[in-house]
Image (cartoon, grey):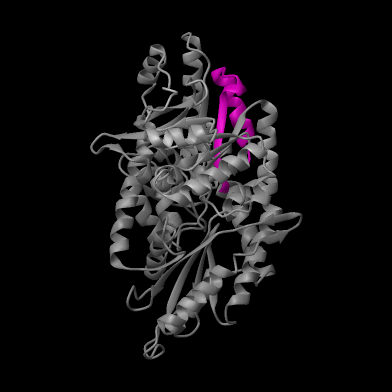
Amino acid sequence: MTTILVIEDEKAIHRNLLKLLNAEGFETLSADNGKIGVKLAQTKQPDLIICDILMPGLDGYGVLHILQQDSSTATIPFIFLTAKTKQADMRQGMTLGADDYVTKPFTRAQILSAIAARLQKVKLRQQQSIINPNLPNRRLLQKRFNQLEKPGNQGKLQIFLLSLEIEQLNQLNNTLGLAIGDQLLQAVVERLHRQLGQQDAIAQIGSDHFIILLSRSYHKPESIQIVETLLKAFDLPFQVDSHKIFLSAYIGIAILGRDGRDLDTLIRHASVAREEAKQPGNRRYQFYIASIGAKSQEAFELEIQMRQALERQEFQLYYQPKVNLLTGQIEGAEALVRWNHPQRGIISPVEFIPLAEKTGLIVPLGEWVLRQACHQARVWQDQGIYPLRIAVNLSPRQFNQSNLTNFVVDILHETGLNPHYLELELTESTLVQNPESAIATLQTFKALGIRISIDDFGTGYSALSQLKKFPFDVLKIDRSFVCQLTEDSRDEAITTAILQMARSLKLKVVAEGVETLSQLNFLKGHQCDEIQGYWFSPPLSAEAFADLLSTGKKFPLLSS
């Protein structure tokens, strides 16, 4: 009999839903809050989960995130049940891994149709796994683990479990479609198998998450060599149909015995280490240590608070002026998000943006930023302030959403902002993941009149021959070069070369992070077009920015 877990805090809806499901012959499990729901899902392993979003304590998004991180529950079909009907809310749930979304009030036919569709998809997946036995499966992983963990099998060597994530795999499925996505997945699996032994077990426990159990014991240096070989295998692109696709891989490593005795614990700890590997400045692989686990718990608590912050409107936009170096006039502003936490005060974007990117919260947060920035730009125009171009950053997850162009057009229409006054900033790492698709998207934006900027230029590793294909209007010099501009001859040489290259490509140049008069004079002397930074103004609230504009403040154009 099919078992369905219902997680719902509204008693009337909960009671009626259980009655409906029981009448249809389903076995039901019941939870009236997120924490109980997670425990039931992990212990009872239902065939499908229906979960409300807005619940006290652990909300539906938090429930889904926990279950997605647990290999035993990651593949259970998950249907959100909620009164929230905004597209951004639906996209957030889907980004996190939800299978469907049913809005309240719902009819009997609607809920049963959603359930039937999810169960049918599971059946097709099971059939496919039988048809194609080369695809990873968790049953093989568990069987192999049971053999390896028996006493006496390890000797003086160690058994290693690897948690491997391929960052763009899920995004590309959404962007390129399931057919191309399946081919890409097969290509990934085949490449992994070529780097491993025949008895090494692999399981796919998420859309972009694999677990690898090495089939025999190794010394630690040997395991590192295997890990580095796996990562090196992703240096070359995957050719699927007419697409040349670049993927990035990260690996976390847990050791049997030292980091856990059961498979689920090892997977959880290896996955925590993998998240540490994704942090800037770290190697692309990390071994698990207990201190990483403590830091992971802190990040999880912050993630729950961030989900609530979106609903409680704790985020604010600040605006940093962009100033023309020829006229001294403020020509635009970059919209920068800040989190005003009720207990901790202002939380730095350095802390919460990477977490939002990792969890998928960057999608609804980014959509809020874009809508709010466009609305504010139009408000200033309606107040009689001369039109300014507003710049908004697009994250990799946002940019790879299949309906991005329609969404941007909808926001422009909704806010009444002329596309000419919107600038979208993207990093080069965002664009080179799938260059052909990126170019097509950018050309659509250009045709609308939206200006395109490449942000943090010079910090990536892309070939200029590749970047020149993109239809940019603006190039932003990263602050890491500007901060030591007059103190480090290498930064001067790099900045000078970027400015010369930009002029030859007929691109405008903006230098960010300008904090001293000497930096300003260098950039002005080398014909930089615009600057932004604390030397002129820090990021300001919308009200303070309007006050700044009303004063008519201009840049002092002469050196002193």
Asked if the stretch drawn in magenta spans residue 421, the answer is: yes
Q: Is residue 421 visible?
A: yes
* Residue drawn 39% across the image and 41% down it: 8
The image shows residue 502, relative to residue 295, as above or below, that is above
449 or 88, nearer to the observer = 449
Residue 441 in percent (x, y) is at 67, 38
The image shows residue 233, relative to residue 173, as above or below, that is below
In this picture, which residue range is highlighted in magenta? Answer: 401-428
The quarter of the displayed image where residue 314 is located: top left
Q: Residue furthest left?
A: 343
Q: Residue furthest top?
A: 384
* Residue drawn 61% across the image and 46% down it: 431
Q: Residue furthest right?
A: 242
Asked if the stretch drawn in magenta spans residue 173, the answer is: no
* Residue drawn 47% across the image and 31% down it: 531
Horizontal side of 348 relative to 24 (left or right) equals: left
477 or 456, nearer to the observer = 477
Residue 143 in percent (x, y) is at 49, 78
The image shows residue 111, relative to residue 139, as above or below, that is above
Horizontal side of 25 relative to 36 (left or right) equals: right
* Residue drawn 51% across the image and 17% down it: 378
Residue 15 in percent (x, y) is at 40, 40
Residue 24 in percent (x, y) is at 53, 47
60 or 538, nearer to the observer = 538
Q: Is residue 84 visible?
A: no
How many numbered circles are shown? 0
